[in-house]
């Protein structure tokens, strides 16, 4: 069960009327989980799982840095102390038992220490708790379909680019709307991103519909696919799960901060693999409940939750 393909529109009242009459449309969300040009660090952690991963990464980095520094200094010492000029008469011994025991035991201790901290984090990710909201994510070439398992809500989620067709004559998006080259940042793409409440900075990240979840609740995502292997990944949540046709796997997260988070398919799945984004909007419980009521009624196939920059546009419409 899905919403109509890529023909998403607001009812005849238009965007401005919707924003004026619905308090829900006034919810502004900060864009938090987004890759940035030149970025070298993790996206801000929005879940306990992501915080654990960040901590583990830094712990291992410190250990590895210490090892690299030690080995580098040891090599420099050996090159200076035992070169032919400084040490013209080389030693004749063939082994050193205490040294051999040390370079065996010390790495073992290091690996055990890393394992003692990494395995609990891994088990926490893999042991899926009982979900307060359960969503099924279905990978297709090249878009995601979502089903709220216990709520009877389902929709598709497509990349917004210049080639995207908007069906909203009341807002000026009729048959004569500007079209652009698929997956290329054009003026048409920018205008369509703005229609959904985004800017050009979210190009190739933003989708027409979004996964909407309540803050502070355990979300279980059941992941599968219809054609080839895909992968559902949201870096700020610290989650990634392959979507394999004929199988259903699961991941879970509990978002700690309201906002908009972006992800991508992370398993090469064909020609448009790089253009299969994921948008997740974490909202208050009240906003989620209101969105759910409207979604079930069918008149809001799309969430009226906009970004902080553009609150008057229904970014799931």
Image (tube, rainbow, N blue to C red):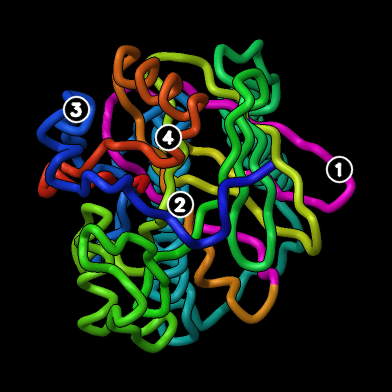
Q: Quadrant of residue 283?
A: top left
Where does the magenta region start and end? 241-269
- Which label is found at residue 263? 2
Mark 1 or mark 2: name the one nearer the start of the chain.
Answer: 1
Horizontal side of residue 37 vs 20, given as left or right: right
Q: Earlier in the sequence, mark 4 or mark 1?
A: 1
Q: Which mark is residue 22?
A: 3
Q: Which badge, 1 or 3, comes first in the chain's sequence?
A: 3
| Above or below, 310 relative to 105 | below
- Name, please, the residue furthest toward the front: 12
Q: Residue at x 23, y 26 (%)?
A: 24
N-term mark: 2 or 3: 3
The residue under label 1 is 247
Choose top left, top right, bottom left or bottom right for residue 48.
top left
Q: Secondary structure at mark 1?
A: loop
- Do the residues bearing badges 3 and 4 touch, measured as CB atoms within 8 Å? no
Q: Secondary structure at mark 2?
A: strand
The answer to whether residue 261 is magenta is: yes
Q: Is residue 119 above or below residue 136?
A: above
Asked if residue 75 lies left or right of residue 119, the reply is: left
């Amino acid at each position: 069960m899905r919403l109509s393909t890529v023909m998403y529109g607001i009812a005849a009242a238009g965007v401005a009327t919707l924003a004026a009459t619905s308090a829900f449309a006034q919810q502004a969300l900060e864009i938090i989980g987004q890759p940035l040009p030149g970025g070298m660090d993790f996206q801000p952690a929005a879940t306990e799982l992501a915080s654990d991963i960040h901590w583990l990464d830094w712990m291992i980095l410190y250990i590895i840095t210490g090892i690299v520094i030690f080995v580098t200094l040891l090599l420099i010492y050996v090159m200076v102390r035992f070169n032919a000029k400084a040490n013209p008469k080389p030693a004749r011994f063939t082994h050193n038992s205490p040294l051999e025991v040390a370079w065996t035991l010390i790495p073992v201790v290091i690996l055990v220490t890393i394992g003692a901290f990494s395995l609990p984090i891994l088990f926490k990710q893999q042991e899926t708790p009982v979900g307060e909201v359960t969503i099924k994510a279905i990978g297709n070439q090249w878009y995601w379909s979502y089903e709220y398992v216990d709520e009877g809500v389902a929709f598709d989620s497509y990349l917004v680019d210049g080639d995207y067709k908007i069906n909203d004559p009341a807002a000026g998006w009729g048959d004569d709307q500007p079209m652009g080259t698929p997956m290329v940042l054009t003026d048409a793409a920018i205008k369509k991103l703005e229609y959904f409440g985004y800017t050009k900075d979210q190009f190739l990240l933003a989708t027409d519909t979004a996964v909407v979840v309540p803050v502070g609740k355990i979300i279980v995502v059941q992941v599968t696919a219809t054609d080839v292997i895909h992968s559902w990944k949201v870096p700020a949540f610290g989650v990634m799960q392959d979507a394999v046709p004929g199988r259903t796997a699961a991941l879970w997260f509990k978002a700690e901060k309201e906002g908009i988070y972006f992800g991508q398919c992370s398993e090469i799945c064909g020609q448009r693999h790089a253009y299969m984004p994921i948008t997740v909007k974490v909202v208050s419980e009240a906003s989620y409940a209101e969105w759910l009521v409207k979604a079930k009624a069918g008149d809001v196939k799309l969430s009226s939750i906009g970004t902080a920059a553009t609150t008057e546009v229904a970014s799931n419409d």
